[in-house]
Amino acid sequence: MKIEKVINNNIICAFDENENEIVVMGRGIGFRVREGMEVAEHKIEKIFRLDNDSSIDRFKALIINMPAEHISVSAELIEYAKTVLDKKLNENIYITLTDHINFAVERYKQKMTFPNAMLREVRSFYRAEYLVGEYGIALIEKRLGIRLPVDEAASIALHIVNAEYGEAMRDTIDITGLIDRVVKMVQEYFSIELDESSLNYERFITHLKFLGQRIFCGELSKEQEVQFLQMIEQMYPEDMECSRKVRDYIKEKYGHHMTEDEVAYLAIHIRRIRR
């Protein structure tokens, strides 16, 4: 592993055994070394491997003047998220979350904290990711001695959701808003409160997440057999009617046409959460 460029005393760029460009972090790893020298492997604390040269360049530009402890705490949090969620995260999270944590810490030092308008929705719809966000707040306090407000747990969670689905932050926020509106529509239609701790509620939210992804990615679902649709109509007429109201809202709000197949499957999930 050879050094390509020294960014600072604690961060260098290097080429691995396959000639892929990587960013390497470790205390003193860039001290009194130069291009072409071998990397002191005993000093390596973290290796960042991003998807492409553009991402590597963006990451290098981001961290060049950033405190090493901010980069370190972000990397530790990302590794924790990968472990507890058991999901593959888009490698660009090393750019987006590191930038966010650094900015959040700097804002806090300047006494500039802002509420997250989606705190309630994120806590409800992305429970596992929100818990990772809470862990992140505790980790930042432990490593940096700064206690960020609980709203930051929701912000961290949204970055993780982005990385899970490979979406832009704008799409994730739009999908979250869609989920919130549909949940309220179902509750209002049947005059009920949904049990957010139930497995059926969790399945319902997951179904809405994928529906939202199809809407904002412009994907269309295929129709099912007519017999299947007729069966759902006969078994769950009220749920189908509620589902059609959701379909009409989505058509008016987002210009997306839900197929009768999608309407029927949504009705099945509505029936489950009502039970």
Image (spheres, rainbow, N blue to C red):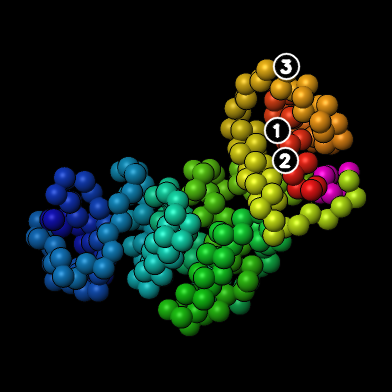
Which three-letter amino acid code belongs to the residue tagged 1?
Tyr
Q: Residue at x 61, y 55 (%)?
A: 126
**Which residue bears the numbered disc 3?**
226
Which tag, 3 or 1, sits closer to the chain's start? 3
Real-space Cα separation, disc 1 to disc 2, in angstroms: 7 Å
Q: Is residue 59 above or below residue 258?
A: below
- In the image, taking residue 227 as reference, residue 244 lies left or right, namely right
| Numbered circle sitting on residue 236 | none
Which three-letter amino acid code belongs to the residue tagged 2?
His
Q: Does the residue at mark 1 contact the one at mark 2 (Cβ under 8 Å)?
A: yes
Which tag, 2 or 3, sits closer to the chain's start? 3
Region in magenta: 184-189
Please, what is the dominant secondary structure of the magenta stretch? Answer: helix
| Numbered circle sitting on residue 265 | 1
Count of labels shown? Answer: 3
Position of the N terminus by quadrant: bottom left
Secondary structure of residue under mark 1: helix
Q: Is residue 42 visible?
A: yes
Task: Choose between 31 and 135: the one closer to the eye.
Answer: 135
